[in-house]
Image (spheres, coloured by chain):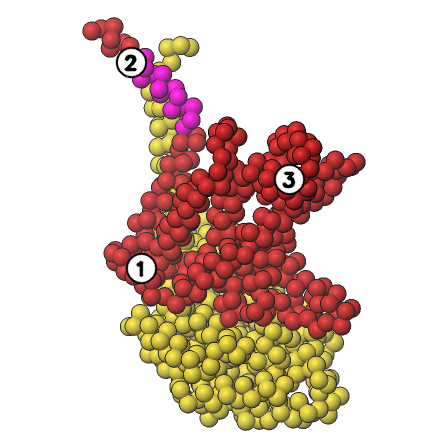
């Protein structure tokens, strides 16, 4: 009896030490992540202007959101953005990664140079620069002028503004590219060699070796890319401010304006939870579909 | 060493934490009501670097004269300020003294966050009438710091070169439109007489109020968009857009006010535009060398434009140091030395004695501000900010009218959307 008790005491002490060691992270998680998340879930059922205390209004926020034209508009804009930005960025970064995978002298310098924009890519400074470049009297129209083309105000025109933002997003391809490059380096060279012996051309090798072998990496980039694209904010906020005529009114920008311009924290919290739901659904779909096209080497003989 | 018990540590940490909490409480309670006690005043304002430096100097001067009162200043740019302040209000930690703007003060007063400052004796410092103008429910919640107002500026040199009849003070909206039509025939093709400000709700509101029809939100509650006037105004601009009297929509929307790269007026694309006293220095910097002349807003039977104070110092209703805060605010706008240090960093000083004492050293930009105020004052209407709760209407107005400017929506559709949003705002305001 006595021995058993001391044993459990020891176990208790053992666990305490463990908890103590992870406590900095644990406290950070509980206080700075879990608590605000729960708080926002609660707030999403309230009307809260920050200046008054929150008032419980049940699911009114959610039903209001569903009939809000701006909500629909921002969803359309965001989905359009995701639909174009994610594939274009992935194709472009895969292309660059394949170019950088060649054995050329001084390749590491090229790699550094090409990765460089990504270090500053997401920043406000670049967004501001982009705004000037694509302005009516910006650099881009200046170059077009050499060829006698009369440019438009790319970011001030509702027909071209979103395209400009997609272009900027594509240009920030660095981290996706690096992950692709790492994936390419892992593909065994002998696969390509034996394919060459069998007489396969460049495209055949790409479709039959590179893509299947790279599919886990593509999948990873796709999931992250979609999540990031849904949360796109900085460039829309700095370059266009959601305008002109709401043509770049991203979902997160909508959320931000509800929260900090119109002080409707409850409404904004509901929007955040809906976004979480949307992203969750998309990720789930991604994982379900991934069975059919993602191949893991460890699964060996499994083939489609 | 091995015997160290974890709970002992926990206890120690806990004790330490509670000491911190207790001392925190103490700090919060140390100030009291009477003004001769020591106090550390939290003070917050928005503005530019020039304003930050001058204000900090003034705070140091006050502490030097009243060693018991020290300051914990905090300052940001405009945007960040209005995000931070509500967050502080939510956590019940508003600073003792905060700079307030006419567009926001009502929302804060409505929620009981600001202290009544009616008992500060401002006679001989601020004009009676100025104070009457800024009273909310008969009480003063913000002490005005400067004069502000809205007039117009135009590029006198360019208009004279083109042989265009110059605008005159107290011209009517008809005169204003006639000027635009005349100037179009005489200006080079890539220059425009006026801006296309259909997407700025205030610009239309100026038109409506000048005709005596009241602001879009009457008494801050009733939705009051006059249909006929609104259609008349926007049809005029649609005509102007077709005739090239206003810039094309994409050029117009590229313009950022007072940005030397894109501002249509600053880059010499547009000849005439509205300008507030507060932005005079920035505008003068865009077209320096005395090119700019001032003019009043177009007026109607009720008047036009506005002139009144829009920047205030308010005191938190929860502040423990209200007496000291009030005393400081009075000093801030009446002390001659402070006035010299502060100059015009918050606009034209509200105290006429101080204004006189610094007048001689005015720069061209500051002088432009004085001139603007001069022309704005005569026929000025009250300043009508959007009431707290109409934010959705305001942002919808902008995006809908941008759609109209790009011919993506008809005026009728836009009107319907606006009425819907206006009614929704009205329901909230009542």
Q: Is residue A10 magenta?
A: yes
Q: Pinpoint residue A274: horizontal percent, then vertical percent.
A: 37, 53
Q: How many marks?
A: 3
Q: Residues within 10 Å of mark 1 (few under 14, many from 20)?
A: many
Mark 2 lies on residue: A9
Residue at image x 68%, y 62%?
A133
Distance (Cα) linking label 1 and label 3: 53 Å
- Disc 1 secondary structure class: helix
Mark 3 lies on residue: A205
Q: Is residue B396 magenta?
A: no
Q: Are marks 1 and 3 on the same chain?
A: yes
Give the left or right position of residue B305, taking residue B92 as reference: right
Which mark sits nearer the N-terminus, 1 or 3?
1
Circle on res. A61: 1
- Residue toward you, B136 or B35: B136
Q: Quadrant of residue B135?
A: bottom left
Seen in the picture, residue B80 relative to B282 is either above or below; the reply is: above
Q: Colour of chain A?
A: red
Residue at image x 72%, y 38%?
A102
- Residue toward you, A185 or A198: A198
Q: Quadrant of residue B183?
A: bottom right
């Amino acid at each position: 009896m006595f021995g058993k008790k001391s044993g459990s005491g020891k176990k208790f002490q053992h666990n305490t030490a463990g908890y103590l060691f992870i406590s900095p992270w644990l406290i950070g998680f509980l206080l700075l992540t879990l608590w605000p998340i729960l708080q926002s879930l609660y707030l999403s059922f309230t009307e809260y202007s920050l200046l008054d205390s929150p008032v419980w209004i049940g699911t009114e926020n959610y039903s209001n959101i569903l009939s809000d034209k701006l909500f629909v508009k921002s969803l359309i804009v965001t989905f359009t953005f995701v639909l174009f930005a994610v594939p274009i960025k992935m194709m472009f970064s895969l292309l660059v990664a394949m170019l950088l995978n060649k054995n050329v002298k001084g390749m590491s310098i090229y790699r550094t140079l090409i990765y460089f924009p990504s270090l500053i890519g997401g920043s406000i400074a670049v967004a501001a620069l982009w705004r000037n470049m694509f302005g009516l009297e910006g650099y881009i129209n200046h170059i077009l002028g050499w060829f006698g083309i009369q440019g438009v105000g790319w970011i001030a025109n509702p027909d071209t503004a979103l395209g400009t933002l997609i272009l900027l997003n594509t240009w920030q391809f660095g981290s996706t590219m690096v992950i692709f490059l790492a994936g390419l380096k892992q593909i065994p060279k002998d696969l390509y060699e034996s394919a060459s012996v069998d007489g396969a051309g460049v495209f055949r090798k790409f479709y039959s070796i590179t893509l299947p072998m790279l599919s886990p990496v593509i999948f990873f980039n796709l999931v992250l890319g979609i999540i990031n694209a849904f949360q796109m904010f900085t460039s829309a906020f700095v370059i266009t401010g959601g305008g002109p005529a709401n043509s770049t009114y991203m979902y997160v920008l909508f959320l931000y304006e509800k929260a900090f311009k119109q002080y409707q924290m409850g409404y904004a919290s509901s929007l955040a939870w809906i976004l979480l739901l949307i992203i969750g659904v998309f990720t789930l779909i991604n994982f379900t579909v991934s069975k059919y096209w993602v191949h893991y080497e460890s699964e060996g003989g499994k083939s489609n | 060493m091995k015997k160290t018990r974890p709970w002992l540590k926990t206890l120690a940490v806990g004790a330490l934490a509670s000491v911190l909490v207790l001392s925190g409480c103490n700090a919060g309670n140390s100030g009291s009501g009477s003004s001769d006690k020591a106090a550390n005043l939290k003070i917050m304002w928005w503005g530019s670097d020039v304003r930050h430096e001058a204000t900090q100097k003034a705070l140091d001067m006050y502490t030097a004269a009243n060693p018991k009162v020290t300051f914990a200043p905090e300052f940001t740019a405009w945007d960040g300020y209005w995000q931070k302040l509500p967050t502080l209000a939510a956590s019940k930690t508003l600073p003792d003294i905060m700079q307030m703007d006419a567009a926001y003060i009502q929302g804060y007063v409505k929620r009981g966050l600001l202290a009544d400052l009616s008992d500060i004796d401002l006679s001989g410092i601020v004009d009676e009438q100025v104070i009457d103008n800024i009273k909310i429910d008969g009480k003063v919640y913000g002490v005005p710091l400067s004069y502000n107002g809205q007039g117009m500026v135009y590029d006198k040199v360019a208009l004279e070169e083109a042989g265009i009849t110059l605008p005159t003070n107290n011209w009517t909206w008809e005169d204003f439109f006639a000027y635009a039509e005349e100037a179009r025939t005489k200006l080079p093709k890539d220059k425009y007489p006026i801006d296309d400000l259909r997407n700025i709700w205030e610009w239309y509101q100026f038109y409506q109020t000048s005709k005596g029809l009241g602001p879009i939100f009457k008494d801050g509650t009733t939705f009051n968009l006059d249909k006929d006037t609104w259609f008349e105004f926007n049809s005029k601009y649609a005509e102007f857009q077709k005739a090239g009297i206003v810039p094309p929509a994409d050029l117009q929307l590229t313009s950022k006010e007072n940005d030397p790269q894109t501002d249509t007026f600053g880059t010499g694309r547009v000849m005439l535009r509205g300008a507030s006293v507060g932005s005079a220095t920035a505008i003068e910097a865009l077209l320096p060398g005395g090119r700019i002349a001032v003019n009043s807003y177009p007026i109607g039977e009720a008047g036009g434009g506005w002139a009144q104070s829009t920047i205030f110092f308010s005191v938190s209703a929860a502040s423990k140091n209200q007496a000291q805060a009030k005393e400081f605010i009075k000093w801030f706008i009446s002390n001659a030395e402070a006035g010299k240090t502060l100059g015009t960093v918050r606009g034209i000083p509200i105290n006429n004695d101080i204004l006189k004492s610094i007048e001689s050293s005015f720069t061209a930009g500051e002088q432009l501000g004085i001139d603007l105020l001069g022309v704005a004052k005569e026929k000025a209407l009250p300043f009508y900010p959007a009431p707290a709760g109409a934010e959705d209407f305001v942002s919808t107005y902008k995006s809908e009218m941008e759609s109209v400017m790009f011919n993506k929506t008809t005026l009728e559709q836009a009107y319907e959307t606006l009425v819907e949003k206006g009614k929704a705002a009205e329901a909230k305001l009542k």
